[in-house]
């Protein structure tokens, strides 16, 4: 990298409520996203309002009550930004890492203005989603470009669309799982739990499920593990979702009389779906099924291997003129026509 470049790196994450009063507007923003709910307007907004209202009064409020009425996602993402900035500054001292949340503050409308004040020579957009999906990565990147245009931010900008088999991410994941496996001599099965999606989104060409499979296979190869399963969590609504669900995976583990180590391979920051859904709700489900040992490996977080991997991706992207993805130059086979590299916007 040329010395003296002013480099801005923007970390994207989903966002979460910072207090109880934020639960409804956060959920409303999320379900109003055209990449999450594909209904046309005004039906999408009406449905978003209804879901946000019911969940903020029921399951959503209950889940966040375990966390003091707020999400810790922003704090965790800021810690990752600090760690990444420190790592990047080893090679390029004039680097700043910014955090932009998709559905709650700080959002792109605010962050684009802050980045513009920094006056960088180049901007690298880095979603904290190892596996690409239209519902997460594409949504964040599209929104950033829209808000950057409004803010008059015309700095050359490149994106890292996905990194499902990145060496740093895989090494960190393997180390975190191994840390849990060492806690017991019992026969254990590794359950790789990813956020689920409706089947129709995958059938429309979204490569997310394929990339989750690639991640699991890469981690298993490094671990040399024989007993493992990929499953999905967080299902809502009546649509058919990709599977098997984590509940089905736990039932199978119970029938096979094996303990489980759960690793949230599509999440790299702790938040409600790891700290409540996995640590509380599914732990209780495992107990009711008679599973003797239920362990949960932490997300990649600020693990040194993960942060070093992200740094290497950023530095490679600075020097590259093409899309960074698992099957460079183009990320996914042609049948995955929702791949960002095939539909590059900005």
Image: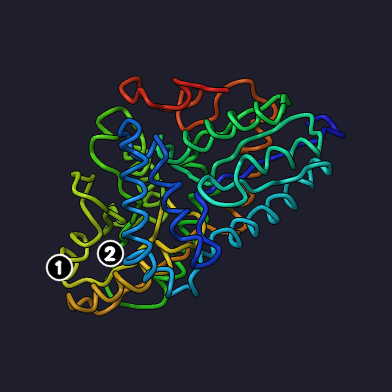
The answer to whether residue 335 is above or below residue 192 is: above
The answer to whether residue 207 is above or below residue 29 is: above
Residue for point 55% across, 29% down: 324
Q: Measured from the top left, where is residue 236 in percent x and y?
A: 26, 53
Point out the tag, 1 or 2, that comes first from the N-terminus.
2
Comparing 286 with 142, the one in front is 142
Corner quadrant of residue 5: top right
Q: Measured from the top left, where is residue 25 in percent x and y?
A: 47, 54
The answer to whether residue 6 is above or below residue 63 is: above
Q: CA distance from mark 1 to mark 2?
A: 10 Å
Residue for point 42% across, 71% down: 180
SS for dot 2: strand
Q: Residue at label 2?
A: 189
Q: Measured from the top left, where is residue 228 in percent x and y?
A: 28, 57
Comparing 21 with 320, the one in front is 21
Residue 71, label in figure: none
Residue for point 16% across, 63% down: 252
Residue 256, label in figure: 1
Contact? badges 1 and 2 (CB < 8 Å): yes
Position of 104 compared to 311: left or right? left
Label 2: how many residues lie within 10 Å, few (<14), some (14-19) or many (20+)?
many
Position of 82 compared to 207: left or right? right
Position of 298 compared to 59: left or right? right
Residue for point 65% across, 57% down: 78
Corner quadrant of residue 133: top left
Label 1: how many residues lie within 10 Å, few (<14), some (14-19) or many (20+)?
few
SS for dot 1: loop
Q: Quadrant of the N terminus?
A: top right
Comparing 302 with 200, the one in front is 200
Q: Quadrant of the C terminus?
A: top right
């Amino acid at each position: 990298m040329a010395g003296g470049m002013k480099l801005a790196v923007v970390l994207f994450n989903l966002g979460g409520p910072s207090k109880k009063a934020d639960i409804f507007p956060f959920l409303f923003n999320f379900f109003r996203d055209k990449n999450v709910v594909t209904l046309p307007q005004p039906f999408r907004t009406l449905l978003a309002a209804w879901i946000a209202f019911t969940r903020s009064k029921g399951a959503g409020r209950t889940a966040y009550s375990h966390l003091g009425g707020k999400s810790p996602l922003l704090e965790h993402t800021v810690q990752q930004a600090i760690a990444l900035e420190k790592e990047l500054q080893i090679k390029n001292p004039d680097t700043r890492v910014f955090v932009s949340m998709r559905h709650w503050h700080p959002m792109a409308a605010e962050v684009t203005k802050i980045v513009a004040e920094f006056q960088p020579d180049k901007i690298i957009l880095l979603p904290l989603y190892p596996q690409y999906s239209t519902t997460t990565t594409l949504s964040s990147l599209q929104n950033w470009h829209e808000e950057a245009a409004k803010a008059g931010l015309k700095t050359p900008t490149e994106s890292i669309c996905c990194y499902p088999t990145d060496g740093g991410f895989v090494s960190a994941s393997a180390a975190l799982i191994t840390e849990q496996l060492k806690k017991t001599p019992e026969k254990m099965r590794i359950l790789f739990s990813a956020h689920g999606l409706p089947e129709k989104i995958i059938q429309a060409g979204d490569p997310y499920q394929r990339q989750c499979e690639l991640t699991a296979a890469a981690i298993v190869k490094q671990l040399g593990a024989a007993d493992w399963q990929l499953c999905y969590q967080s299902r809502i609504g009546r649509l058919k979702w990709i599977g098997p669900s984590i509940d089905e995976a736990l039932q199978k583990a119970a029938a096979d009389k094996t303990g489980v180590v759960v690793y949230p391979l599509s999440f790299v920051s702790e938040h409600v779906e790891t700290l409540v859904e996995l640590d509380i709700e599914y732990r209780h489900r495992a107990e009711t099924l008679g599973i003797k040992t239920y362990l949960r490996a932490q997300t990649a977080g600020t693990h040194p291997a993960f942060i070093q991997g992200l740094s290497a991706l950023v530095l490679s992207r600075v020097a590259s003129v093409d899309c960074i993805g698992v099957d460079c130059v183009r990320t996914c086979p042609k049948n995955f026509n929702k791949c960002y590299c095939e539909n590059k916007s900005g």
